[in-house]
Image: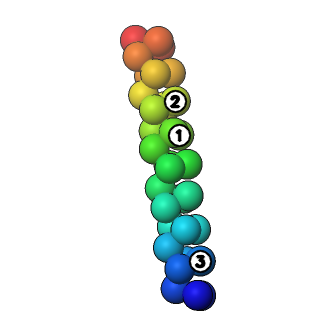
Amino acid sequence: MVYLEEEILVSNLMKKIKRLNKKVFLIGKINK
C-alpha cells in the first residue's frame, strides 16, 4: 500500500511539472 501511495504522489508531481512546463513555454512564447 505504501508503494502504491508513492506511485500516486509521483504521478501527481509529474502532472504538476508538465502543467508548469506548459505555462512557462506559453509565457516564453508570448515574451518573444
Q: Is mark 1 on a helix, strand or loop?
A: helix
6 or 29, which is in the foreground?
Answer: 6
| Sooner in the amino-acid sequence: mark 3 or mark 1 | 3
Give the label on residue 31, or none: none
Residue 19, position in %: x, y? 51, 39
State the separation of the CA atoms marked 2 and 1: 5 Å
Task: From the image, tell me which residue sits under label 2.
Answer: 23
Residue 10, position in %: x, y? 51, 67
State the separation of the CA atoms marked 2 and 3: 27 Å
Cβ–Cβ below 8 Å for labels 2 and 1? Answer: yes
Q: Quadrant of the C terminus?
A: top left
Task: From the image, tell me which residue sits under label 1.
Answer: 20
Q: What residue type is labelled 1?
A: Leu
Q: How is the image coloured?
A: rainbow
Mark 2 or 3, which is nearer the eye?
3
Q: Residues within 10 Å of mark 2 (few under 14, many from 20)?
A: few
Question: Seen from this angle, which residue lies furthest bottom?
Answer: 2
Cβ–Cβ below 8 Å for labels 3 and 1? Answer: no
Q: Which amino acid does label 3 sit on?
A: Glu
Task: From the image, tell me which residue sits under label 3.
Answer: 5
State the separation of the CA atoms marked 3 and 1: 23 Å
